[in-house]
Image (tube, grey):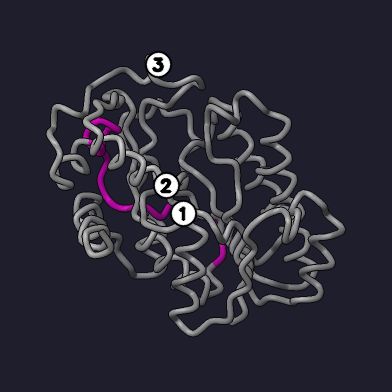
C-alpha cells in the first residue's frame, strides 16, 4: 500500500511513517509547508493526484492548546481547512483517509471514560477546530477512519519540541515541575497507536474510533511515573491545579475507552503504565 503521511516530522507522524515502512508499505512523508502547504486546496489536489496514494494518514495539526486559543484563525486554517483539503483530495482519488483527532472534542464533564458514542462538546479552540475537521472528513471522504486519542508520548519528532525529552532535561537540571492533579486523560504511547492505525488502515471497517492506552491518570500521576522511572526525585513533580498552569480552559476528564476499536479489530491496547515502562526501556537504550 502506498501511504501518504502528513506531519511526518512530528511526534506521531514520524512514528506512523516509520511503522508503515517497517511493515513493507511505500511511504510518502510530508514534513512541512515548504514541501506542501496543506492549507492550499489546489496544491493539495495536484499533489494527491500526482502521487495517487492508497491511503492518507493526516497527522499534521496545531496541537498546542494555549497557542490555539491565542490564534484561533491560524488554528482553524491548519486544523480544519487543511483537513478539509486533504479529505477532498482523498475523496476525489478514492484513497482511504485516517484523520488523527483528539479527546478534546469532549467537554470533560463525564465522570467515567468516554466511548465513541458519547456526545461531543469542545470547550476550547483546539478541540473545536479538530471537531470541525472530523465533520469535514465525514462529509468529503467516504473511506475514512477518524482516530481520537489522548495525551501522546514517544521518542520521535523534533527533540526540542518532544514533551517527555523536555521534562527529562528540566529534571536533570534539578527543576521542580508543576503538574495538574485535576486534569485526567488517557496517556498513549505513539508506538502503540501507530501499530493500531496500521492494523485499521488495512481494513475497510470505516468509522470513528478511540485508540488509546487503557486506564486514566492525572497529569501529575503521569509526570510522577516518568520522573521516578527516569531516576529523579518524586519531589521534582509538584501537584497543582490546571488553572494555575495553563492559559486555555482545560478539561477535567477526557479519559477514553477503545470500545469500538477492540470489538471491531479484535485487538487490545495495553495499560498506560505498561506503555510508559516500554517507552522508558527504549529511551534508556538510546541514551
Q: Residue at x 54, y 40 (%)?
A: 63
Which part of the image, by quadrant, shows the N terminus?
bottom right
Identify the residue position indicated by label 1 in the image: 11
**Residue situated furthest top in the rendering:** 244
Q: Position of residue 98 (x, y in %)?
A: 58, 62
Q: Quadrant of residue 131?
A: top right
**Sequence-first disc among 2 and 1:** 1
Bounds of the magenta segment:
206-223
**How many labels sit on residues?**
3
Instruction: Left or right? Give the position of 272 relative to 28.
Output: left
Q: Is residue 220 magenta?
A: yes
Which part of the image, by quadrant, shows the C terminus?
bottom left
**Labels 2 and 1 touching (C-beta < 8 A):** yes
Q: How far is disc 2 from disc 3 in space, using C-alphas? A: 23 Å
**Sequence-first disc among 2 and 3:** 2
At mark 1, the secondary structure is: helix
Q: Position of residue 268 (x, y in %)?
A: 29, 63
Identify the residue position indicated by label 2 in the image: 162
Q: Position of residue 23 (x, y in %)?
A: 44, 81
Amino acid at each position: 500500500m502506498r501511504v501518504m503521511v502528513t506531519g511526518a516530522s512530528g511526534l506521531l507522524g514520524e512514528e506512523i511513517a516509520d511503522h508503515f515502512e517497517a511493515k513493507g508499505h511505500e511511504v510518502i512523508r510530508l514534513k512541512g509547508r515548504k514541501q506542501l502547504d496543506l492549507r492550499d486546496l489546489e496544491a493539495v489536489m495536484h499533489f494527491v493526484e500526482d502521487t495517487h496514494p492508497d491511503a492518507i494518514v493526516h497527522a499534521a495539526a496545531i496541537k498546542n492548546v494555549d497557542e490555539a486559543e491565542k490564534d484561533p484563525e491560524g488554528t482553524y486554517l491548519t486544523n480544519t481547512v487543511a483537513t478539509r483539503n486533504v479529505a477532498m483530495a482523498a475523496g476525489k482519488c478514492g484513497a482511504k483517509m485516517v484523520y488523527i483527532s483528539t479527546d478534546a472534542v469532549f467537554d470533560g464533564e463525564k465522570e467515567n471514560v468516554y466511548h465513541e458514542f458519547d456526545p461531543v462538546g469542545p470547550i476550547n479552540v483546539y478541540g473545536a477546530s479538530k471537531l470541525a475537521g472530523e465533520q469535514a472528513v465525514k462529509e468529503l471522504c467516504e473511506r475514512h477512519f477518524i482516530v481520537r486519542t489522548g495525551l501522546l508520548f514517544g521518542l520521535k519528532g523534533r527533540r526540542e519540541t518532544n514533551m517527555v525529552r523536555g521534562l527529562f532535561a528540566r529534571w536533570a537540571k534539578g527543576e521542580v515541575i508543576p503538574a495538574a492533579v485535576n486534569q485526567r486523560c488517557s496517556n498513549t504511547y505513539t508506538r502503540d497507536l501507530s501499530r493500531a492505525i496500521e492494523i485499521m488502515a488495512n481494513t475497510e471497517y470505516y468509522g470513528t474510533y478511540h485508540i488509546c492506552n487503557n486506564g486514566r491518570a492525572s497529569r501529575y500521576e503521569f509526570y510522577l511515573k516518568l520522573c521516578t522511572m527516569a531516576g529523579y526525585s518524586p519531589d521534582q513533580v509538584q501537584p497543582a491545579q490546571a488553572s494555575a498552569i495553563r492559559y486555555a480552559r482545560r478539561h477535567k476528564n477526557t479519559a477514553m475507552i477503545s470500545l469500538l476499536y477492540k470489538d471491531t479489530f479484535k485487538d487490545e491496547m495495553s495499560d498506560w503504565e505498561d506503555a510508559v515502562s516500554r517507552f522508558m526501556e527504549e529511551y534508556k537504550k538510546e541514551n
